[in-house]
């Protein structure tokens, strides 16, 4: 009996060695997505699992999602980071994998640290993960663009009642200014460290005028704008709302300047954005039902925009806002 057991153990070990050699050979000769994975810097163990499992990758990925959900419920966020790397290796083209990881870093883990610079490092890690790794891996999915735009607007920009918001905005502005003086992205050298394509920046600025890229809302607009155009006639609703929202925020505080004495950044309005915002409102309303919750907000924006543009002497844009108010909000128009 012992001899038989020894035989089967030896045979099993041999099979394992053969399988390991076969998988190692696949890693060494990987092509296409697997080649990118093999060169991505992932740990050998993750590469071994991702490439070697073949048709079982989907099943293992589902099991890891169950495990991740349990860790989430138990608040084991730091452990989730490593597990999420496994899931990303198994399902690299799934937008949900990358947004889940980025959310965990930028929200769940960052709030575990009381010091603003420590929080910021985790927020930036989530941002870079989604922008530099997730977006290329899941390219073509507008949801990726909306998730990235949301991170810039909500996490980097911060909510008004967030006591850390001013610190996050300062960290971001300083980081941008280090590569793009005065917040101008007009070259590959300025755009590449920020994940921005200067050609796409110029295309956007034809519509909006020159943007100050030290403002996180400019980046939120950049990514949401791309996602909206990628969605075509389907008009991804979250991307559309983010474009509208960030255009409006930029009209209120879209330009930064440094105070000479303190070196602090001070925000001021960027009124040149209004014509682009009015045009975007027109596009949105043309495809929007009366029940859409964004519709009433657009009505208030158009009313404010018409008043500002009239006072500022921008008669053409003011007239466009007036036409939209008459057409879509006749009961409220005065």
Image: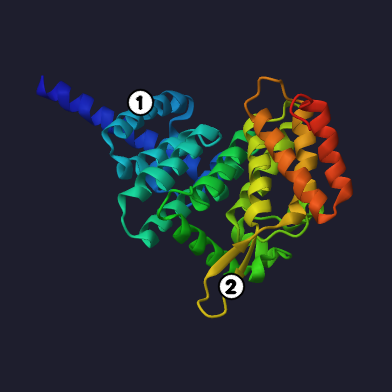
Residue at the outermost right position:
316
**Circle 1: is it few (<14), some (14-19), or many (20+) Cα within 10 Å?**
few
Instruction: Indicate the position of residue 334 as horizontal and vertical percent values.
Output: 79, 33
Give 134 or 247, whichever is nearer the viewer. 247
Instruction: Please say whether residue 309 is visible from this viewpoint.
Output: yes
Give 117 or 256, whichever is nearer the viewer. 256
What element does badge 2 sit on? Answer: strand
Which color scheme did the rendering employ for the protein?
rainbow
Tell me the residue at 70%/20% (across/down). Answer: 290
Name above or below for residue 258 compared with residue 52.
below
Tell me the residue at 85%/52% (across/down). Answer: 314
**Looking at the rendering, in which quadrant would you find the N terminus?**
top left
Q: Which residue is mark 2?
A: 258
Tell me the residue at 45%/37% (across/down). Answer: 100
The answer to whether mark 1 and mark 2 are in CB contact below 8 A is: no
**Circle 2: is it few (<14), some (14-19), or many (20+) Cα within 10 Å?**
few
Give 193 or 52, whichever is nearer the viewer. 193
Instruction: Indicate the position of residue 5 as horizontal and vertical percent values.
Output: 16, 23
Q: Which residue is mark 1?
A: 66
The picture quadrant where one finds residue 167 is: bottom left
Could you tell whether 115 is left or right of 62 in the image? left
Name above or below for residue 73 compared with residue 315.
above
Tell me the residue at 33%/37% (across/down). Answer: 17
Instruction: Indicate the position of residue 110 as horizontal and vertical percent values.
Output: 37, 50
Marks 1/2: CA–CA distance = 49 Å
The picture quadrant where one finds residue 199 is: bottom right
Residue at the outermost bottom position:
261
Could you tell whether 129 is left or right of 189 in the image? left
What element does badge 1 sit on? Answer: helix
């Amino acid at each position: 009996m012992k001899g038989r057991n020894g035989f089967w153990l030896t045979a099993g070990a041999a099979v394992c060695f053969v399988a390991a050699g076969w998988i190692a050979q696949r890693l060494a000769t990987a092509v296409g997505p697997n080649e990118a994975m093999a060169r991505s810097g992932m740990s050998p163990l993750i590469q071994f699992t991702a490439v070697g499992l073949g048709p079982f990758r989907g099943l293992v990925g589902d099991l890891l999602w169950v495990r991740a959900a349990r860790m989430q419920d138990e608040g084991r966020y730091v452990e989730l980071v490593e597990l999420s790397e496994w899931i990303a290796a198994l399902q690299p083209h799934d937008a949900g994998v990358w947004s889940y990881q980025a959310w965990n870093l930028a929200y769940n883990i960052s709030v575990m640290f009381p010091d603003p610079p420590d929080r910021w490092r985790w927020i930036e890690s989530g941002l870079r993960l989604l922008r530099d790794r997730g977006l290329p891996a899941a390219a073509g999915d507008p949801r990726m663009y909306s998730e990235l735009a949301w991170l810039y607007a909500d996490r980097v920009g911060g909510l008004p009642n967030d006591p850390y918001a001013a610190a996050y905005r300062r960290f971001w502005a300083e980081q941008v200014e280090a590569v793009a003086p005065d917040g101008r992205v007009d070259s590959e050298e300025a755009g590449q460290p920020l994940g921005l394509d200067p050609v796409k920046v110029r295309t956007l600025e034809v519509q909006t005028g020159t943007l100050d890229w030290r403002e996180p809302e400019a980046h939120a607009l950049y990514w949401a704008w791309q996602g909206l155009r990628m969605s075509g006639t389907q008009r991804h609703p979250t991307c559309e709302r983010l474009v509208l929202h960030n255009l409006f925020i930029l009209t209120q505080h879209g330009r930064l300047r440094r105070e000479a004495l303190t070196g602090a950044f001070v925000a001021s309005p960027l009124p040149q954005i209004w014509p682009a915002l009015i045009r975007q409102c027109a596009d949105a309303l043309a495809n929007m039902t009366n029940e859409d919750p964004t519709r009433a907000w657009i009505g208030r924006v158009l009313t404010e925009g018409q008043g500002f543009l009239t006072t500022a002497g921008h008669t053409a844009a003011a007239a466009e806002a007036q036409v939209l108010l008459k057409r879509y909000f006749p009961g409220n128009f005065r």
